[in-house]
Amino acid sequence: MKVRLVLLVLLFPALAHARAPQNATRAQAAPPLTGFRAEFFANLDDVQEKIMELAESTPADKYSWRPARDVRSISEVYMHIAGGNYFLATYLGVPAPTPQRDLEKTVTKKADVIAELQRSFDHLRAAAAKTTDLEKQVKLFKNDTTHRGVMVTALSHLHEHLGQSIAYARMNGVTPPWSR
């Protein structure tokens, strides 16, 4: 029995390694993204990483901080980002998750904010991945655009609020992790 166990322990890594090329071949079989789609997902990866790192670096007791009365707090900005991700995905044909609620007012604790942000990025990413016709016409804010235009708007919105979040963080003594 001990001999079998020793053989199994010794052979398991070799068996796992032997299977790796098969899995790698399957992964390589999927065509890589090119053009606008590749650029969109690379940009989304970058802005998402920065927003998530900043949200995680900001102390929980600062999430209710706001620079002035009647201006969004830190948690409200992050939940505005999440709401925008859900909202803009609807223009790509993917409904927002239900139930829809006022995220800015109901999700305020750091752990909940980070979890909701992550879900919203996953939702936007899935909606964009399902988008096959980038030139499909849609109306966005009473203007004619395309699915490509919706995706550009999503990135613009994310970058706008990343900048806002950086300013909020720095006003609270938090240095963005990627600039340390």
Image: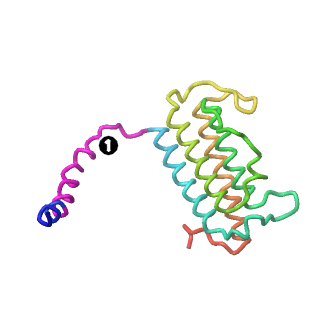
Secondary-structure class at tag 1 = helix
Question: Extreme left residue here?
Answer: 3
**In the depicted view, which residue is nearer to us: 46 or 27?**
27
The answer to whether 74 appears left or right of 131 in the picture is right
Query: In the image, is residue 122 above or below residue 134?
Result: below
Where's the N terminus, which quadrant? Answer: bottom left
Q: Which residue is mark 1?
A: 27
What residue sits 78% from the left and 60% below the top? 73
Picture quarter containing residue 71?
bottom right
Question: Extreme top residue here?
Answer: 137
Residue 153 image offset from top left, x and y in percent: 65, 41
Picture quarter containing residue 112?
bottom right
The answer to whether 56 appears left or right of 22 in the picture is right
**In the depicted view, which residue is nearer to us: 24 or 19?**
19
Residue 13 image offset from top left, x and y in percent: 21, 59
Q: Which segment is the magenta one?
A: 9-34
Residue 87 image offset from top left, x and y in percent: 68, 39
Question: Would you say residue 3 sits in the magenta stretch?
Answer: no
Magenta span dominant secondary structure: helix
**Amino acid type at mark 1:** Ala
Question: Extreme right residue here?
Answer: 69
Question: Would you say residue 29 sits in the magenta stretch?
Answer: yes
Query: In the image, is residue 111 above or below residue 120?
Result: below
Q: Residues within 10 Å of mark 1 (few under 14, many from 20)?
A: few
Residue 61 image offset from top left, x and y in percent: 73, 70
What residue sits 30% from the left and 42% below the top? 28
